[in-house]
């Protein structure tokens, strides 16, 4: 899929961000959670499984608070997850906790992926996706 604007990527799943300035996740009408995840956090595909790991501690603010709550809820309720993939050439800034909304980023979706939050331990989380 071609690059999309951030909110447009979420709208492709029917999800509406609570606040376009800081939200990075939203619920879709089908009951799934749509999350934005950095491409550089994805592991190579292994046995058909696409894994993505990250840490809540990497950044802060209201977007992080919302993301943390929704990811933990998705983990405990076994909620399906859909993904918006965020890409940047400024990985070191992202990893240092800089305001990523001020960086040059591109966004795409994977409509043929469905995932789950498979782990939340302390500040660390993991998603696993399969192609439908």
Image: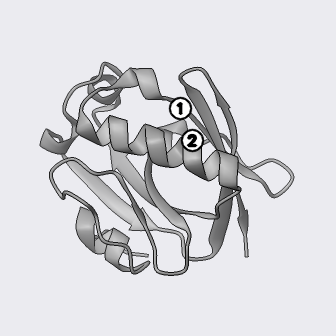
Query: Badge 1, how many Cα within 10 Å: few under 14, some, many 20+?
Result: some
Numbered tag placed on residue 117 in the rendering? none
Callout 1 secondary element = strand
Horizontally, residue 13 falls left or right of residue 61, namely right
| Marks 2 & 1, CB-CB < 8 Å contact | no
Residue at 44% x, 76% y: name it.
1
* CA gap, disc 2 and disc 1: 13 Å
**Residue most extreme to the right:** 47
Tell me how the rendering is colored: one colour
- For the C terminus, the quadrant is bottom right
Q: Is residue 64 left or right of residue 117?
A: left
Q: Which of the 4 image quadrants contains residue 17?
A: bottom left
Q: Choose between 78 and 86: the one closer to the eye.
A: 78
Which residue is the site of mark 1?
A: 54
Residue 95 is drawn in which quadrant? top left
User: Going from the N terminus, do you reach mark 2 or mark 1 first?
Assistant: 1
Q: Position of residue 115 (x, y in %)?
A: 67, 60
Place of residue 46 in the rendered image (x, y in percent of width and height, measured from the top left): 81, 47
Q: Is residue 80 left or right of residue 108?
A: right
> Where residue 75 appears, x then y in whole percent?
65, 46
* In the image, residue 109 above or below residue 121: below
User: Is residue 38 shown to the viewer in this render?
Assistant: no
- Mark linked to residue 72: 2
Which residue corresponds to the image point at 45% horizontal and 73% vertical from the top-left?
Answer: 28
Q: Position of residue 84 (x, y in %)?
A: 43, 61
- SS at mark 2 in the image: helix
Is residue 31 visible in the rendered image? The answer is yes
Mark 2 burial class by Cα count in 10 Å: few <14, some 14-19, many 20+: some
Comparing marks 2 and 1, which lies closer to the viewer?
Answer: 2
């Amino acid at each position: 899929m071609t690059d999309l604007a951030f909110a447009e990527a979420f709208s492709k799943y029917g999800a509406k961000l609570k606040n376009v300035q800081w939200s990075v996740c939203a619920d879709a009408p089908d009951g799934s959670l749509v999350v934005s995840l950095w491409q550089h956090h994805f592991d190579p595909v292994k046995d058909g499984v696409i894994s993505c790991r990250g840490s809540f501690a990497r950044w802060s603010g209201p977007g992080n608070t919302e993301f943390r709550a929704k990811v933990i809820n998705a983990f405990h309720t076994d909620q399906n997850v859909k993904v918006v993939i965020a890409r940047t050439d400024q990985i070191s800034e992202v990893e240092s906790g800089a305001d990523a909304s001020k960086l040059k980023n591109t966004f795409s979706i994977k409509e043929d992926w469905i995932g789950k939050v498979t782990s939340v331990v302390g500040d660390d989380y993991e998603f696993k996706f399969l192609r439908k």
